[in-house]
Structures are given as C-alpha cells and as structure tokens.
Amino acid sequence: MSYVYESNEDSEDTFKQYEIREGIVFLVDVTPSVVVVNEGTSQLYEILAAINDLMSELIITMPKTGIGIYLYNCTTAKDNKVNVKPINSVPHAYKLFGLADLNIHNMKLLNDFLDDHRNGLIDINKAFIPDDPSKKLSGFDPAVLPKLLTKLMGELNKKSKYNLKKVVWFTSNDNPLLGDEKHKESMWRIINDYSQNYYYIDPIFLDKFDPSLGEKLPFDMSIYQDIFINTNYLNNRKRRAQVDDDDDSDGKKKRNDYLSSNSRGFKDLLYDGLSANSNKFKSTTITKQIRASIFRLKEIKRIVFNCNLILSDGEETGGNLGCTVKGYSIYNHESIRRTKHVYPHLEHLKPIYLDTVLIKESLGDPLELPPKHHKKSQRQREEEASVMKGLELPKEKVIYFNDEQVSFMKSSIFDNRMKENNTESLDDNNDEDDNEMKTNVSLSYAPYLKLLGFRDISNFQPYYNLVPPIFVTADLDNGLRSYSLGGGYSNSFKTFSALYQQCLKLKKFALVFGPYKRNATPCLYGMIPSLLTFPSDLRFPEGFLMVRLPWLEDVRSLPNDYIDQGTAYSSSDNELVGKFKELINHFSMDAIEPKEFPNPALNYFYLIMKYNLLQMDITECDLTVEDKLKEILLNNRQLIMNDDTILDLIKDIKLHLVQELNDMPSLVPSNVKKSKLQVQKTFSTENLSPDEIIQSCFKHQDWKQSTVAMLKSFAKLKSIVVDGKTKQAFIDAISNYLEGGI
C-alpha cells in the first residue's frame, strides 16, 4: 500500500475549494395518473406543494440554490388562469418559472398558484390537460421528452454559476417512447451527455392509476432500466476504480488526466449514478412519499475534515499502511448570523454599507491617519507592541513563545514513539553527540488519525457521546483534492472497505487518536460501524460513526474528590440501581430526529418575513415556547398518577435517596468556620433592646432584622473601628468584635 504525495509545485487549482451552489430542475410528466384525485389529493398538487415548502426552507439554509419547474406532455385548458409559459421549439411543454436563484417573484408565483387552488379559484388538476399515450388522438408525442431534455441541457450549460446540477424527474408513464427504437437511441445519447457533464438525473416513478376507476395499475420499469443502466451513467465509479488499479504503472499520467478539470473533482464528490440494484427500480413512489422524496434534496454532504487514517506506521513488515478518509456532519441546526441592515430598492433588498470616520474631539474635523497605519496588519501591530503568546505557570511565571515555536506546536504532535537514529555522521568530531542522541522522538503533522486498537461493541456506552458524531467514509480521491493534505494513501477505498467489513463481522469498534484538523486538539475517538448502530429498516449509508470519547480534558473536569478517591467516591447501591431500572422500563421514548426540532425563534422570524413578502394572511399562533414541553410533562404525569406500581417505586426511591443523603459524610473542608455553616433560622425580636437584637443577629447569623442605625449605635457604644460606611462593613466589624469578646 503506497503513500501518494503531490508536491506543492503542481497547480494550486487542483486543491481549490468550491462553494456548493445547487441548481435543481423539477421535471413533471403530466399524465392522467398525476392529476387524478386519490385520497383527497393529487400527485401534481403534492409535488408543487412540497416544492413550495422546500423553497421556504432553502431560502433560510441555502439561499444561493437555483430552482426551476417544468411540465410536459400536457396542454393548458381554454380558460387558462395559470401563469405558465410555453417552451420554444418543444410542443406541449411549459415552465412555471425557469432555473434561477431563489427569489421572491418565483416563490410568490408558486405560492399564489397553490393558494388559488386551496381557495377554489382554480383547479390544478383541471388546469392542465394530460396527453394520454393510450389514446392516439390525445396529441401524445414520444419525441417531446428527448427534445425537452436537450433543451434543459442547454439551459443548464448556460447556468455556469451552479457547480452541482440536478434534474428531478417525476413520471408515472411506463411507456414514454411507445417502443420507438429511434427515440430510445436518442435517449441513450442524451443520458450519456448528461453523465459526461455531471448533470445528475434523479427519476422518481409515481404510482400509476386508472383514471376512470382510480385503481392502482402495475408499473413496468424495463424501459427506464434499459435507458439508464446501459449507458455511461455508471462510469463515474468505474473510472475511479480504474485509476486506483492502474496507479502503480502509469498512475501519474492517468491521475493528471483525471484532475484535468478543476470542477470535475468537486462534482465527483456529489455525483452518484444508478445501479441495477437501486431502489429506484424496485418500487414506485406513493403520494404520501412524494414530500419525503423532494425534501431529501436539501440533504447535502457537508465535509467536516479530510485526513489520513494511519493503521500502521512502523518500519517493520506491514508498516506505512493506512487510508485517506473524509468526515461529514450528520446534522446541523439553524443558527442566527450577524444582522445585516438592508433597504428596499424596487423589488429587491439591498444591503447598507457602513463607513467609520475618526474625528478630532475638540474641532470635529476628520482625523487623517498616517499612510503606514493602513498598510499594517493586526499581526504587524502586535509584533511592534511586543505582544507574544505565552503559557502561564504557578507563582506568576510565564513562558513566552516566538512565532517559530508557536508554528511548531500547531503543526507537530509528539507520538511518544521512540525510534533509532542509525544514520552515521561523516564528521568524526561529532561521535560523542551521535552516541548521546541515538534516539529521537517521532512527530506526526496534523491532520491525522492513528489507530490504537479495537474493542468489542458491547464496551461502548452511549453516554460517552459528548458531541454530535461525524460520519466517516473513504476518500475516493486519495487526498489529492484536499487543501490540508496535498496527497494521501493510494487505494483508500479498498483499505477502508476491508477495515469496515472486519469491524462489522467481528462486532468491534476502532479506537483512534489524533487531530482531524490542523487547528484541532488531539482527542480520543471511537469509530463505530453504522450498521451496528442503526436499525436495518432505517436508510443510512455504510461507514463509521466517529464519536469523541472522554479523554484528558474531560477527566480533569471531574470533581477533585472523585479523582482522589476513585470508584469509592461513586459507589452505587445495587438495590437503588435495580429500582431505577425497573422505573425506566415503564417509560419509552422514540428515537430523536434532529430535523423534527428546528430553531423556533429563527423559523418564526422567517415565517413572518415570508408572510410579508408573499403578501399572505398572517395566521395567529401561540408563541409560548414551553407548550410542547408542558404537553409532554402532563402526559407523563398522567401516566404516573394512573399507575400504582410507578408511584410505589418513586416513593421507595425517594426514601432511599433521603436516607443516603443523611448517611453521607460531610465534604466541607475542616478549616471553614462553623459559624458560617449554621442554618439560618428566623427569630423573634419582640421586646428586645437594640443591643440584644444585634447579639441575636450575630448568634443566628441573620442580619436582616438589624438596621444601619442599630449597627452605628452599637459600634459607637462599644468603640468599634469600622472600615467603611456600608451596612456590610458594620456587620463585619461587629462580628469580629463579638467573636473575640463573646
């Protein structure tokens, strides 16, 4: 297993980072099954409504995404009230709006269209008359589909600002070409062109219904399997494997050819093909699943890190073995960014740019800074001011670090592995120095992860999960497109696959250590196979879930008594543990889906903005944040009150805990004054003189009953010197006097 490294002399464009900008085209085949009303709604309405909701969410998370909606194989009704535009040179094809960045105009157009349907002003299912392929006089033309796909390719080519382009194709027609071989060959060529340009086509096959009876009909997918599987749609993965296999012979030349296009590498990360075993060809999508299929489009792969996973780095047999991996975030909640001030200009909102001018305090004239001041960076000004990084030590001592030392500490990490230095020096005068330094400490340069060993999956405890896990998979490009690596291990996918399969077979998880980023702190991680974590019926890609495990910083944050006494400090009562287990078994909680718990404040802000910009009626809603929590608590309370077994368990646990608290030894240091620990109790000052009130306040350590006048009078009477004029100063002085005299 060789290690591949690309020198810095190569073109920097190879490692250029790209921003994800998606261009999504929704292509809807308006068939009789799409417009038929089944279970109170139609497939066409569900598609458009889901796209409308998707746009409302994308405008929050990914506002630079492009959306376009196209319909074909239909004609508009004579009393056309739908604002759609026919597509030039393509008969029976329309667009609600073309591919463009998310904007208010398109969102309002689609939202008004759906509102008019809900209010009964128009009927979406009757606004478009489908071309039925089973009827010769319906105007159905099998040439429409190839012409429209060719037209869409031309439009996608013009939209160069999108570096990830998709065509989501909805259809319930299992015979779109009417068996015409000429049109089938045209489709082959078009699909090949799409794959060559990295335009991903995602076909979604809908249920097929009998318009007259409303019964579900069988769907034959053979024509689509013939179109997709027998083209170059799968060559993306095949080409990667070929590059890896030929890497040892003329891999340098092939790799350069493979990296000839800058954007091609980025698209390889997000472009997937279809296989013969794909779920697309196993079953159709029912009406209730349309929304879920569309909302999966916003699930973009977000890369967290790219580093080498070192399996063995020794000099013996089997050394220098590893693979290059990538880590992806599983979920991220919305977060509020810095507010931008904007002002309305025509139909758009433009940002307000602020400029700061320094003026003289006395005259009010602008203060002109020297030209050299503008050219100096923050780092240069810190160097001139002799600002240095340092490490604070006990007794107010500080170790200062220069730039070279700081750079070394950030990029190098000691592995605690000593290695022999067998290099013979040519200078005889340095023999003694060579003998003294036969060994030196090995260093690794971040980012990297090193394999420490394996443990049985039963040893992993869920409460070890301190932060959200990261999904780790192999880097198919062997680190060649990583800015932080500049190159990685060859055949990473094969090595990673072998590691994953063995962990899955033996039901073990891997323990790794290291910093996965240049500026990250080394930590201990557990890499758990995803199939051992998620149930089989949950659709989740195969790979490792990297979970951060407790390490030095976490151990240091434990209480000092626990560190000193160890397990004796946290010895548990088996009887109490058994009762808690019995209590927990009475409750059950579903798995938490983070996407079901959005940021309420942020989403409400965007909801108000949406209603305002789209000129919709604002519906009243309860802004009480605790409503959902109160509902859950009330349901649990009702469950507890209706079950005598649970009530008895809670009563026993409460009595047991109270008894343990009473028997627990005091952890208060012995040097703390007992007078400060006395429990404050209320006492009566009735029929007491001011002097007696002061003494009672001191005895009970409760000075609420005293006043400043009483304290001043008592201090004057006893000739007590008070350092201050506040009530607390008098209390401290009188307390010191009484402690010494009583």
Image (tube, rainbow, N blue to C red):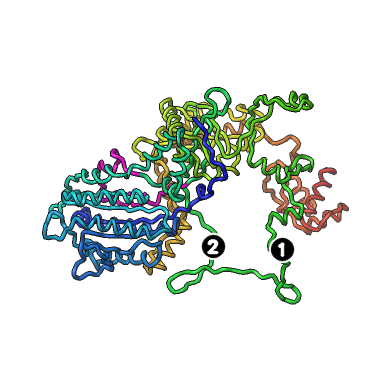
Q: Compared with residue 278, is residue 347 higher up or lower down, i.e. above or below?
A: below
Nearest the camera: 651 or 68?
68
Identify the residue at horizontal 71%, vertical 41% (top origin).
677
Nearest the camera: 720 or 103?
103
**Contact between labelled residues 1 and 2, with CB atoms less than 8 Å apart:** no
Q: Is residue 634 visible?
A: no
The answer to whether residue 69 is left or right of residue 592 is left
Q: Magenta segment range?
A: 273-302
Identify the residue at horizontal 48%, vertical 52% (top origin).
18
Q: Quadrant for residue 67, please give it.
A: bottom left
Q: Which mark is residue 339?
A: 2
Task: Looking at the image, tell me whether mark 2 or mark 1 is earlier in sequence order.
Answer: 2
Numbered disc 2: secondary structure: loop
Return the residue found at the far right. Answer: 719
Numbered disc 1: secondary structure: helix
In which quadrant will I find the C terminus?
A: top right
The answer to whether residue 274 is left or right of residue 244 is left
- Identify residue type, mark 1: His
- Identify residue type, mark 2: Thr
Q: Which mark is residue 626?
A: none
The alpha-carbon separation of the residues under discs 2 and 1 comes to 29 Å
Give the x, y percent position of residue 481: 49, 44
Q: Nearer the viewer, mark 2 or mark 1?
A: 1
